[in-house]
Image (cartoon, rainbow, N blue to C red):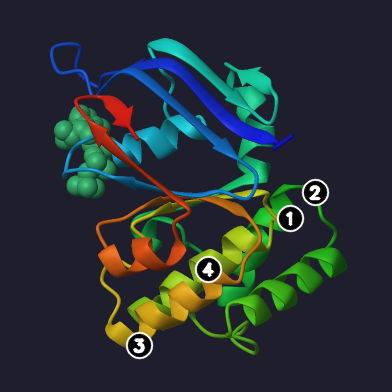
Amino acid sequence: MTQELFRLEDLGFAHDPARPVLAGLEFSLSAGERVAVLGDNGAGKTTLLHLMVGLLRPQAGRVLAFGAERRREADFHDVRARAGLLFQDPDDQLFCPTVAEDVAFGPLNLGAGRAEAQDAVAEALEQVGLPGFGERVTHKLSGGEKRLVTLAAVLAMRPEVLLLDEPSNALDRAARERLIDILAGLPQAMVIVSHDDDLVERLATRRVVLRGGRIEE
Ligand SMILES: Nc1ncnc2c1ncn2[C@@H]1O[C@H](COP(=O)(O)OP(=O)(O)OP(=O)(O)O)[C@@H](O)[C@H]1O
């Protein structure tokens, strides 16, 4: 039987009660899937990813992750360790002076020791094709390099799921190709929010559309 990683049931969310973003949304993600979530600007795609890891809480419905219902902040600590969210803007994810510190942040936060975190950093930078970038100053990196460093920061936590919010946004052709090749080689289940047809074509095993607050297959 395929392992179910996430299940969202009858989810409802609004920032402003007069304008619901999600209503009656049903969605599930299983191991081995790479699901592209398409939809117009403002449809609620980023909101959906943030609800999955508890950065936002639904006003209705249930979030099940890794076989358990998640309600309180404490429930989501485990979810955030196992489902890595790549933010739409890399600058929201990188806040340390050097690349190594940014990539080590997750493992250290999860309780890894120094040596273990260093190994995770080296492995993750290798995975994204940036070995030797550890001592680089994060804010001086190019946009494409920043994107890959955020991916390394997420991979360093060895997540089971990747939640990618417009990962190829603002990348040039070469950087996009490189990112797509790296993502295509990763074993994790993924939810990919993207307006990039080529990326979706090459990565997605399933496509859904977020429209009118719900997921349509
Ligand atoms: N903090 C907030 N307060 C009020 N409204 C918000 C807030 N954040 C998002 N919204 C609104 O919620 C709706 C959904 O936003 P969301 O960012 O999830 O859409 P999206 O599908 O990811 O859009 P895009 O494709 O443009 O990134 C939009 O109408 C947005 O303006």
Q: Is residue 141 visible?
A: no
Disc marking residue 93? none
Residue located beneath label 1 in the image: 108
Considering the numbered disc 2 on the image, is that residue within a helix, a strand or a loop? loop
Q: Is residue 23 left or right of residue 69?
A: left
**Marks 2 & 3, CB-CB < 8 Å contact:** no
Task: Please tell me which of labels 1 and 4 falls first in the chain.
Answer: 1
Count of marks overlaid on the render: 4
Task: Please tell me which of labels 4 and 3 falls first in the chain.
Answer: 3
**Marks 2 & 1, CB-CB < 8 Å contact:** yes
The residue located at (69%, 56%) in the rendering is 157
Disc marking residue 174? 3
Can you tell which of label 4 and label 2 is closer to the viewer? 4
Residue located beneath label 4 in the image: 183
Q: Is mark 4 within 8 Å of ligand 1?
A: no
Q: Amino acid at mark 2?
A: Gly
Task: Please tell me which of labels 2 and 3 falls first in the chain.
Answer: 2
